[in-house]
Image: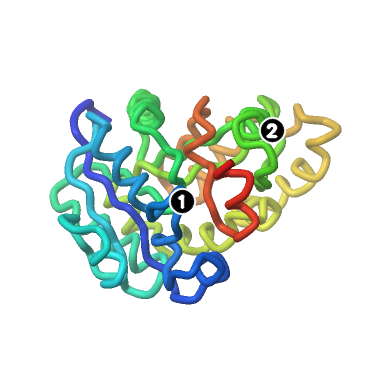
Amino acid sequence: MSAGSIPAVVLAGGKPGEALATASGVRYKALVPVRGRPMVAYVLEALAACERVSAVHVVAPEEVAAALPGVRHVADTGSFLGNLTAGVAACEGARFSLVITCDIPFVTAEALAAFIALAEARDVDLAYPIVELGLCNERFPGMRRTSLRLREGRFTGGNAVLIRPAFLQRNAGLIEEAFAARKQPLRLARMVGWDLVPRILLASKLPGLLPLSLAEERVQRLVGGRVAAIPLAYPEIGADIDKPEDLGPLVA
């Protein structure tokens, strides 16, 4: 990857009537109010303040786009993969796109810039941020996160990726499957190799069994490309609001 401005895609779609939206009195998750404002607005602010980000495209239903005047709107396709593909396609001519979800209202421009810089240093087709679970618990006590024990520590995933469009085209089906399994570490392990399953099961007692480098190598073998997990000291990049009970600990 080379330094320069990178276009961003905000995934702000979804079905109306999700539990979080309904509990918050709105139709779509992106419009859930956090401290009096739609949570997607905070994500857009962080992107606008990040000097590494150029154009920002928002994939969303018309109702969400109408609440965000002036955004570059990409129509919601009704599926995760469709929205991801449409958003990246909107970044016409870009070598890479920063894809981020609408539900991390505490993300900062500093966190995004750090992720982009570290990802560029790895020179990969897809980069994904991971954060030590202890940092998340310290910054957001009470937040429940799916995590995985590695040799280097216990990590949880962030809600952004830096991706090469050609890589997305080659691996669309695998990416959709991985998204569906994102909160199930054992299911993800089976995708990249059954021999990782016992390593994951035993990792809490024998953490040396699963180094980050091995996990990366297996994913790269599966997708036929260069993939990197980027340890990041910014828990806000993974502090997503998914359920009504998340609003209390995160907004406090």
Which label number is shown at residue 34?
A: 1
Task: Pinpoint residue 76: horizontal percent, then vertical percent.
Answer: 31, 70
Task: Pinpoint residue 162: horizontal percent, then vertical percent.
Answer: 35, 41
The reply to whether callout 1 and callout 2 are in contact (CB within 8 Å) is: no
Label 2: which secondary element: strand
Q: Amino acid at mark 2?
A: Arg
Q: CA gap, disc 1 to disc 2?
A: 29 Å
**Residue at 28% across / 52% down in the picture?**
166
Circle 1 residues within 10 Å: few <14, some 14–19, many ≥20: some
Above or below for 88 versus 15: above
Is 84 left, or right, of 146 in this rendering? left
Q: Residue furthest front?
A: 36
On-image quarter of the N terminus:
top left
Query: Along the line of sight, which residue is nearer the eye, 173 or 87?
Result: 87
**Residue at 60% across / 60% down in the picture?**
244
Query: Along the line of sight, which residue is nearer the eye, 12 or 118?
Result: 12
Query: Along the line of sight, which residue is nearer the eye, 161 or 243?
Result: 243
Above or below for 127 versus 39: above
Circle 2 residues within 10 Å: few <14, some 14–19, many ≥20: some
**Residue at 58% across / 44% down in the picture?**
250
Is 36 left, or right, of 64 in this rendering? right
In this picture the colour scheme is: rainbow
Q: Amino acid at mark 1?
A: Val
On-image quarter of the C terminus:
top right
Is 145 left, or right, of 79 in this rendering? right
State the image quarter where residue 124 is shown. Answer: top left
State the image quarter where residue 200 is shown. Answer: top right
First of labels 1, 2 by sequence position: 1
**Residue at 38% across / 55% down in the picture?**
38
Which label number is shown at residue 146?
A: none
Identify the residue under disc 2.
154
